[in-house]
């Protein structure tokens, strides 16, 4: 039976003098069942790569191109994860363990990056040194001959953690992003990547169509992987807990690119890239490129202004205060403007107080009054008994005429700690453009005032096509990186269901999971109020 590896490191090499060192480093620093798959694309390695049971080498006498070679490596892999790596790199000790530990099925993970110090030129007479550069004719100081001394160490003072692309889709470094709140922590979103190293599940690599060989052999790889990762509905992150070190050969001569690349080839790759992402021709894209730019806005080189976000919060002021205060505390930490609509005056954001009795029409009026008082372009609906994870508020709606629901939510019994999760669209997870919500809730309030509320009208905008619907707008789902927690207690508006059998229509409880509050990812159980631990 064929052995299943944990990680396949995929390397393509053409005239790469440091390939053997790169492979040796991968084997020395792996800590799990990791292999190396190499395509020698048009040349044999010199010096050769040593024989090893965990190294597979394919040789093409005539080059097939970098993208085609990486795809071939991935087709040979049977590992759970694949990691593309350039042939002139060093990897961190235990890189495979660290990357696997923080990689979800729809993630692309990039290690932090260091520049690689590969060699120096040293004068045989005066010992003067030149940091890696084209071969010098002689020592500039004494005229002596120069010999090359291998260093092969990362430059730990040259670390990169964030990358982007500009309006022409050209790769750029983005050092200032680490100063933003989104740049804090060990796992952070990154708009783009260098293309020299990326890590993901092997299944995910093929779900996003591998590498697009229509680009040609070389160019735009970081932009391609980044756009596919994000626009498919997935995520691309930098893992600061590990790193790779990359050799840059930018000085020309015999220390430049190891094989010829024509300007026509580069132009072709860039033209094809623009067609895919700017013209939106990649068929698996769920979001347009504008969504990605808005998510990371402001992005240098892009004219797009960031869209303002805000929170609307509504409560009947009858909730257990331990729950209410815990929810409000977390919402304050998000640092978005809050408009609260309540039935009693309260000091929480900008408060709108309605002297009305609890009921469906009152709740709809609260939502409408909060929407009218907000000035945000994008609004998140929040309820007084749902704990929201910060990642929930990272979402940017791709379309202005669609209601979006975060389906990553666990329902937790506040007396036992029992927890269930299934795909569902709830108003407590709703995010949309404020103008769309205003249009809907103005019409909803008018309809309920005129003819009363029926369950067939439904609570969630855009989620059904029954004749009693408020309007014809559509709804879509998304899932935040970490879940929200819907606290189930004696005063919930809707009934709690703790088994699949309680659903008359089993289509309403897809992807059902059961567990305990202590096992919900991204949460400390001590943060969750009124839970009795076993």
Image (cartoon, rainbow, N blue to C red):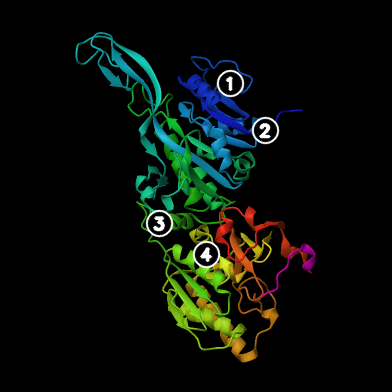
Residue of label 4: 399
Earlier in the chain: of badge 3 and badge 4, it is 3
Instruction: Please give the name of the residue rendered at 46% of the width and 81% of the height, measured from the top-left corner.
Output: 352
Residue of label 3: 297
Earlier in the chain: of badge 1 and badge 4, it is 1
Q: Position of residue 362 (x, y in %)?
A: 57, 85
Instruction: Please give the name of the residue rendered at 53% of the width and 17% of the height, measured from the top-left corner.
Output: 44
- Residue extending farthest to the left is 141
Mark 2: secondary structure: loop
Q: Nearer the viewer, residue 470 or 346?
A: 346
Q: Position of residue 64 (x, y in %)?
A: 55, 28
Q: Nearer the viewer, mark 3 or mark 4?
A: 3
Residue of label 2: 78
Tell me which segment is drawn in magenta.
494-504
Numbered mark located on residue 59 in the image = 1
For the residues bearing labels 4 and 2, Cβ distance under 8 angstroms: no
Magenta span contains residue 275: no
Q: Position of residue 341 (x, y in %)?
A: 49, 79
Mark 4: secondary structure: loop
Numbered mark located on residue 196 in the image = none
The image shows residue 358, relative to residue 77, as above or below, that is below
Mark 1: secondary structure: strand
Earlier in the chain: of badge 4 and badge 2, it is 2
Earlier in the chain: of badge 3 and badge 2, it is 2
How far is disc 1 from disc 4 in space, using C-alphas?
A: 47 Å
How far is disc 3 from disc 2 in space, using C-alphas?
A: 38 Å
């Amino acid at each position: 039976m064929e052995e299943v590896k944990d990680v396949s490191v995929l390397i393509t090499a053409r005239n790469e003098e440091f390939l053997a060192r790169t492979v040796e480093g991968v084997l020395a620093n792996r800590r799990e069942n990791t292999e190396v798959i190499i395509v020698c694309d048009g040349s044999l390695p010199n010096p050769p790569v040593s024989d090893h049971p965990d190294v597979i080498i394919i040789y093409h006498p005539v080059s097939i191109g970098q993208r085609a070679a990486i795809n071939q490596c991935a087709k040979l892999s049977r590992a759970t994860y694949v990691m593309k790596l350039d042939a002139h790199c060093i990897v961190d000790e235990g890189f495979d363990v660290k990357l696997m530990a923080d990689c979800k099925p729809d993630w692309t993970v990039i290690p932090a990056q260091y520049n690689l110090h590969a060699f120096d030129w040293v004068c045989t007479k005066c010992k003067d040194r030149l940091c890696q550069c084209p071969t010098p004719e002689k020592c500039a100081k004494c005229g002596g001959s120069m010999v090359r001394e291998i260093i092969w160490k990362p430059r730990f003072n040259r670390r990169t953690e964030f990358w982007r692309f500009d309006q022409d889709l050209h790769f750029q470094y983005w050092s200032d992003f680490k100063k933003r709140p989104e740049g804090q922590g060990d796992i952070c979103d990154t708009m783009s990547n260098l293309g020299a190293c990326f890590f993901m599940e092997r299944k995910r690599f093929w779900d996003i169509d591998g590498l697009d060989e229509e680009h040609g052999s070389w160019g735009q790889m970081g932009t391609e992987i980044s756009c596919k990762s994000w626009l498919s509905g997935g995520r691309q992150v930098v893992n600061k807990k590990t790193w790779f070190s990359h050799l840059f050969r930018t000085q020309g001569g015999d220390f430049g690119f190891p094989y010829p690349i024509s300007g026509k080839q580069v132009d072709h790759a860039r033209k094809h890239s623009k067609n895919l992402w700017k013209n939106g021709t990649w068929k698996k894209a769920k979001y347009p490129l504008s969504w990605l730019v808005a998510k990371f806005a402001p992005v240098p080189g892009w004219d797009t202004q960031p869209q303002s976000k805000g929170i609307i919060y509504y409560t009947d002021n009858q909730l257990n205060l331990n729950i209410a205060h815990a929810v409000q505390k977390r919402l304050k930490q998000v640092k978005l403007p809050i408009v609260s609509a309540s039935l009693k005056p309260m000091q929480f954001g900008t408060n709108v107080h309605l002297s009305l009795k609890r009921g469906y029409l009152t709740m709809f009026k609260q939502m409408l009054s909060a929407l009218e008082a907000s000035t945000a372009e994008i609004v998140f609906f929040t309820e007084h008994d749902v704990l929201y994870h910060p990642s929930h508020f990272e979402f940017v709606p791709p379309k202005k005429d669609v209601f979006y629901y975060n389906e990553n939510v666990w329902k937790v019994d506040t007396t036992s700690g029992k927890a269930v999760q299934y795909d569902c669209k709830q108003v407590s997870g709703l995010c949309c453009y404020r103008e769309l919500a205003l249009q809907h809730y103005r019409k909803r309030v008018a309809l309920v005032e005129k003819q009363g509320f029926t369950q067939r009208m439904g609570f969630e905008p855009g989620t059904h096509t029954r004749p009693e619907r408020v309007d014809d707008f559509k709804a879509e789902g998304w899932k935040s990186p970490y879940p929200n927690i819907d606290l189930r207690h004696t005063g919930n508006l809707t009934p709690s269901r703790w088994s699949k059998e309680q659903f008359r229509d089993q289509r309403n409880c897809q992807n059902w999971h059961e567990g305990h509050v202590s096992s919900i990812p991204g949460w400390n159980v001590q943060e969750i109020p009124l839970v009795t631990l076993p």
